[in-house]
Image (cartoon, helix red, strand yellow):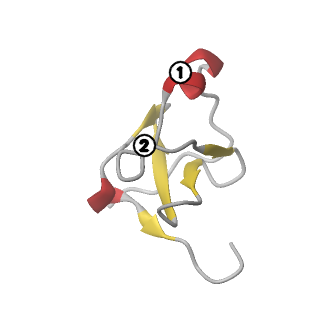
Amino acid sequence: MSEPTLSVDVDPRLLEILVCPVTRGPLEYDRAKGELVSRGARLAYPIRDGVPIMLPEEARELGEGE
């Protein structure tokens, strides 16, 4: 699995329309980690080369306190 590109810019309009594919809830953009975070599903979806990978099997589970 490739590492996410850190501090990647994502089109703000895209961030407004994307939702978690599991919960259909909102996502938070974590610029430092290059991820879109779903608090409801406790998953972080990677962003690779500026493209959000919105597949639950590609997401990492959030740890305690994240």
- Asked whether 20 or 5 is in front, the reply is 20
Which residue is rendered at x = 50% and y = 51% of the image? 4
- Look at the numbered discs 1 and 2 and tell me whether their residues touch, using CB distance below 8 Å: no
Q: Secondary structure at mark 2?
A: loop
Relative to residue 10, is residue 36 depicted above or below?
below
Q: State how far apart marks 1 and 2 are (Cα).
A: 15 Å
Name the residue type under label 1. Answer: Leu
Relative to residue 15, is residue 58 depicted above or below?
below
Give the quadrant of residue 51. Answer: top left
**Can you give x and y, in whole percent of width and height, for residue 31 in the image?**
70, 44
Q: Is residue 58 left or right of residue 66?
A: left
- According to the picture, the residue beneath numbered tag 1 turns out to be 14
**Can you give x and y, in whole percent of width and height, for residue 35 in the image?**
56, 50
Nearest to viewer (mark 1 / mark 2): 2
Within 10 Å of disc 1 (Cα), the crowding (few <14, some 14-19, many 20+) is: few
**Can you give x and y, in whole percent of width and height, for residue 21 in the image?**
35, 45
Q: Quadrant of the N terminus?
A: bottom left
First in residue order: circle 1 vs circle 2: 1
Which residue is rendered at x = 64% and y = 83% of the image? 64
- Asked whether 54 or 39 is in front, the reply is 39
Q: Secondary structure at mark 1?
A: helix
- According to the picture, the residue beneath numbered tag 2 turns out to be 24
